[in-house]
Image (cartoon, rainbow, N blue to C red):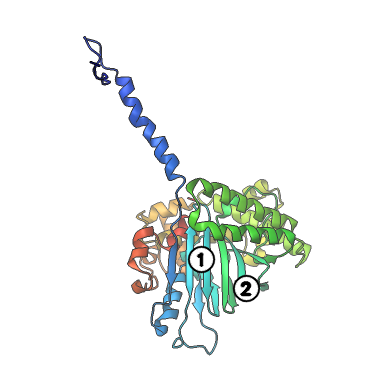
Amino acid sequence: MSQPLASPDDTGGDAPPVHGERRRWPRSARPVEDAVAATFPALQPLKFTTRDLPPSDQFAAWQTYLAPLVDIKLPEGAGTESGFPADHTAWNLGSMLVVQQDAPAHSYLRSSARLRSNTIDHWHVVVLRSGRTWTEVDGLVCEGEPGKVEFRSLGYPFRGRTTDAKSMSVFLPRELFTEIGKDIKNNTSISGNYTKLLIEYLDSIETNLASLTAKDLPQIVQTTRDMIITCVSSSTDTSGTTETQGNLALMERVRRHVQRNLNSPDLTPDTLCRELGISRTRLYQLFEPSGGVLHYIQKRRLLSAHAALSNSANRQQIIEIAAAVGYTSAAHFSRAFSKEFGYSPREARSVAVPPYFAHAVSPAEIGETGHSFDEWLKSLGH
């Protein structure tokens, strides 16, 4: 009669148990689990719609939802009674947000005041499916329409208007583009063969968002970035003078260096000149319309501090926030802050935020994502 097979512990005699063999089995399960998980869809969209609300409440709900990003107004003469049916669906790819939007005509404004409370400076790349837009930055207007790609920085004030429009757009952190040799020109639209390829690629991403897996996401972000760089580098857009374009490019380089070094005591005009390879005269001429380079550095520091102070989730003490943006004296920081904004750092702690219409987004959607669109924007790339 055959004997039963011995178990791994049935070694006989006084031989010690083979502990190494025991540990091997549970360790091999994790890579298998990870491999299987990587093949499942990775993205859960954050959906917002006004269509389920009473028509008179729809526009107010839309205003509130986008308030962290821009201020929204109805066209002149339009009322809220007729409703504002709009949809906004966001997908978070980790280092890139994809947004699908369908909304009636309205105007929008990202003001200097908005930048104080929300200092995100991502690039916003817009592809219109229908409708037209007109966006103004520093007196220059960019017109958007289907077949073009718009590039806009959230780090600068802008305003504009749109007709009834459908769009697909992506938000990308500025850090993805810091190493390229060519600066992206703010508030511009481009077209041409490379732009068509970029639009087709974004179309393919949009079509497959619901089925993308975790292992797909880094490559998609990288490819999107590379295609954008190719489009910018090959653009034949020659609007504006060469001198103006050169000033904008240099301003962007200065802005990036200042933002990366806000907490450095060595952030001075001399350091900027040395790091960027420009003369003091050139630097001072560039910032003369803005009140001077020292004023610009101080303003960027104060804007960053204001955003931290007005963030209810930030538990840092005021002196810690001041130090994080380069101030070593609490009294100096308080005086500069009060002069810039008209109220003290302590008062900034209680700056009111727009009321949130809790019924505008279903509790189920909030529970599934654990985030809001505002939080996604702030954490983009981190």
> In the image, what residue occupies the spot 40% across and 73% down?
354
Residue 57 appears anywhere in the view: yes
Quarter assignment of residue 37: top left
> In the image, what residue occupies the spot 57% across and 51% down?
220
Q: Identify the mark nearer the N-term, 2 or 1.
A: 1
Q: Is 317 left, or right, of 184 in this rendering?
A: left
Viewer-closest of 223 and 278 = 223
Q: What is the spatial separation of the Cα atoms under label 2 and label 1, in whole angstroms?
A: 17 Å
Quarter assignment of residue 338: bottom left
- SS type, badge 1: helix
The residue sitting at the front extreme is 1
Q: In which quarter of the image is the N terminus?
A: top left
> In the image, what residue occupies the spot 68% across and 55% down?
183
Q: Is 117 left, or right, of 294 in this rendering?
A: left
Tell me the amino acid under the disc marked 1: Leu
Instruction: Say the numbered circle drawn on residue 135.
Output: 2
Instruction: Say the numbered circle drawn on residue 99.
Output: none
Q: Is 50 left, or right, of 126 in this rendering?
A: left
> In the image, what residue occupies the spot 70% across and 57% down?
231
Residue 155 appears anywhere in the view: no
- SS type, badge 2: strand
Tell me the amino acid under the disc marked 2: Thr
Instruction: Say the numbered circle drawn on residue 115.
Output: 1
Number of numbered discs on residues: 2
Q: Nearer the viewer, mark 2 or mark 1?
A: 2
Give percent across and percent down for residue 127.
62, 66
Quarter assignment of residue 151: bottom right
